[in-house]
């Protein structure tokens, strides 16, 4: 089969053996795959947890038809249209654990749109609902709201009854579009007064829940913007892995500061994340209420160009590969 394989310096389209599913896996004929920042990290020569390095087939999410199921798999059959998360989606065929697979809704969702959904849905349901404990009537801020995951986070917050959704982006054109995806207030974190603006938007109380994809560069301002007994969920570190942290302000406000990642979770934990997400959100997915815009689609043969497009950071929404 054809696959986009990492080399020491780039990525190449190669003919590689088709994967064989284990007892707990499903083999899928990939029709579209979504790009994610973790792919770009590995493309840039760094590890993402234990993944990465020459020989790696990138691709954390994809959609396609079931070809074969392992002996322990139930609930899926050959021909099913599915969306998956895992590793190896930049290829004609990929395998995924049965617990990381969902049936594509029957509302004429395209392969390309289906491929944009798994990572964003799983990541943000886990961050906003499970770890963030968002309750109806609360306020929430999504740091890095113009990413695919961020756009989904705002929509989930609205669906779960948030009273006020604040989205942040450093790009003016992207800020103009955040309202389409649930933002009631939009802030620019390059403005040194943005934390004061967040306090003003919440009548001085502060934000109940901050889902942070930026981290280091905004950490202390997050503490300032948070409510007493607020929660901050550390999802990403686009602004740096390390930085200054005001421990006294953290203690004064009695903030729950929660770190999340999929890299250290067991297979069983990820299955449960996907199960909870579907139980909570699937009616909204089927109704088309939760969706992501596609910025641009590339052919699988052009995987390197797609990753370069992501690296240029000029996109809004998801980039996908097809073929």
Image (cartoon, rainbow, N blue to C red):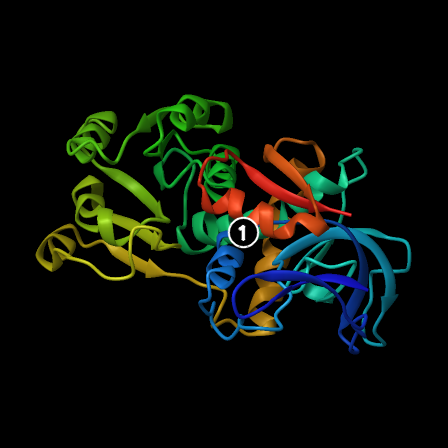
In the picture, residue 54 is in which quadrant? bottom right
On-image quarter of the N terminus: bottom right
Residue 127 or residue 236, whichever sits in front = 236
Question: At x 78% / y 78%, what residue is drawn?
Answer: 22
Residue 33's place in the image compared with 26, above or below, is above
Q: Position of residue 241 (x, y in %)?
A: 29, 61
The answer, for residue 23, to whether it is visible in the render is: yes
Say how many tags the image has.
Answer: 1
Q: Is residue 86 left or right of residue 313?
A: right
SS for callout 1 = loop
Residue 156 or residue 65, whichever sits in front = 65
Single out the residue that lies furthest toward the left.
248
Question: At x 19% / y 58%, what residue is drawn?
Answer: 243
- Give the residue at mark 1: 36
Residue 110's place in the image compared with 60, above or below, is above
Question: At x 71% / y 37%, what residue is drawn?
Answer: 286
Q: Is residue 275 left or right of residue 260?
A: right
Q: Position of residue 269 (x, y in %)?
A: 56, 69
Crowd around label 1: few <14 · some 14–19 · many ≥20 (10 Å): many
Q: Position of residue 14 (x, y in %)?
A: 73, 65
In the picture, residue 21 is in which quadrant? bottom right
Q: Position of residue 2 (x, y in %)?
A: 78, 61
Q: Is residue 310 left or right of residue 282?
A: left
Question: At x 61% / y 34%, what residue is drawn?
Answer: 294
In the picture, residue 292 is in which quadrant? top right
Q: Is residue 15 left or right of residue 204?
A: right
Residue 194 or residue 43, whichever sits in front = 43
Residue 69's place in the image compared with 123, above or below, is below
Single out the residue that lies furthest toward the front.
9
């Amino acid at each position: 089969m054809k696959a986009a394989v990492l080399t020491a310096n780039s990525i190449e389209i190669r003919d590689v053996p088709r994967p064989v599913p284990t007892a707990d896996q499903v083999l899928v004929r990939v029709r579209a795959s979504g790009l994610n920042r973790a792919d770009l990290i590995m493309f840039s020569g760094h590890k993402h947890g234990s993944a990465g390095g020459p020989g790696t087939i990138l691709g954390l999410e994809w959609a396609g038809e079931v070809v074969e199921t392992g002996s322990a798999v139930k609930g899926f059959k050959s021909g099913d249209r599915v969306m998956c998360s895992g590793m190896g989606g930049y290829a004609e065929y990929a395998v995924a654990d049965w617990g990381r697979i969902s049936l594509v809704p029957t509302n004429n969702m395209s392969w390309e749109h289906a491929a944009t959904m798994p990572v964003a849905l799983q990541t943000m349901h886990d961050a906003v609902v499970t770890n963030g404990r968002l309750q109806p009537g609360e306020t929430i801020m999504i740091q890095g709201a113009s990413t695919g995951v961020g756009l989904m986070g705002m929509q989930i917050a609205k669906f779960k009854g948030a009273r006020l959704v604040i989205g942040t982006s450093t790009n003016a054109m992207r800020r103009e579009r955040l309202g389409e995806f649930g933002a009631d207030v939009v802030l620019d974190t390059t403005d040194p007064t943005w934390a004061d603006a967040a306090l003003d938007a919440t009548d001085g109380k502060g934000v109940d829940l901050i889902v942070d994809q930026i981290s280091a560069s905004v950490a202390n301002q997050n503490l300032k913007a948070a409510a007493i007994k607020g929660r901050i969920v550390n999802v990403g570190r686009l602004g740096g892995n390390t930085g200054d942290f005001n421990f006294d302000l953290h203690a004064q406000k009695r903030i729950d500061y929660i770190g999340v990642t999929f890299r250290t979770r067991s297979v069983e934990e990820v299955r449960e994340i996907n199960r909870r997400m579907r139980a909570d959100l699937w009616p909204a997915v089927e109704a088309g209420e939760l969706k992501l815009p596609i910025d641009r689609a590339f052919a699988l043969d052009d995987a390197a160009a797609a990753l370069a497009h992501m690296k240029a950071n000029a996109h809004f929404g998801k980039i996908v590969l097809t073929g």
